[in-house]
Amino acid sequence: MLVDPARFTYWVPGLRRAVVIASGPFNLPAEIHFEFSTSLTYTLVYTYDLEAREVRFEPRLGRRDGVRGFARLEPAEGGTRLEYGLEEGEGRSASDRELGDLDALVASFVKMMTSDR
């Protein structure tokens, strides 16, 4: 879910399109092109620490429009704990920033994880 662009639009509000443009080890996305909101486009480069169950991402193209951050999955009593950090680029408008609200994003992700999609 965290690195499957085919499912991103289900849980990332405002995301119109996400396409893998380069893959890395284990066929995990190394770079993804994004089209967000009405006109923002950028690519994110992904790095993975599989042992720590962590993915980090940062913009390569379109830094002002893009985001940077990380996601980490940790075992927790009764399930899995998701830790997620997000920093938005300077080029995002107030309405674009509302779409990227971290609490709403995590809630959308959790809903997607528990649905039958």
Image (cartoon, grey):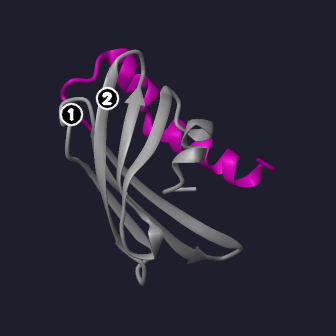
Vertical relation: 35 (above or below) 28: above
Q: Is residue 107 left or right of residue 30?
A: right
Residue at coordinates 22% horizontally, 33% vertically from top-left? 89
Name the magenta segment's main secondary structure.
helix
Residue 78 location in percent, x, y?
71, 73
Task: Tell me the tag on residue 62.
Answer: 1
Label 1 to label 2, Cα distance in Å? 6 Å
Vertical relation: 48 (above or below) 104: below
Residue 32 location in percent, x, y?
37, 48
- Please, what secondary structure does the residue beneath circle 2 have? strand
**Closer to the N terminus: mark 1 or mark 2?**
2
> For this rendering, which residue is in front, 24 or 107?
24
Task: Give, as a single range, the part of the protein colored magenta.
Answer: 88-117
Q: Is residue 84 left or right of residue 69?
A: right
Task: Tell me the tag on residue 53.
Answer: none
User: Considering the image in quadrants, where does the N terminus appear?
Assistant: bottom right
Q: Is residue 116 left or right of residue 99?
A: right
Q: Residue furthest bottom?
A: 51
Amino acid at the residue labelled 1? Gly
Residue at coordinates 57% horizontally, 36% vertically from top-left? 9
Q: Disc 2 marks which residue?
A: 41
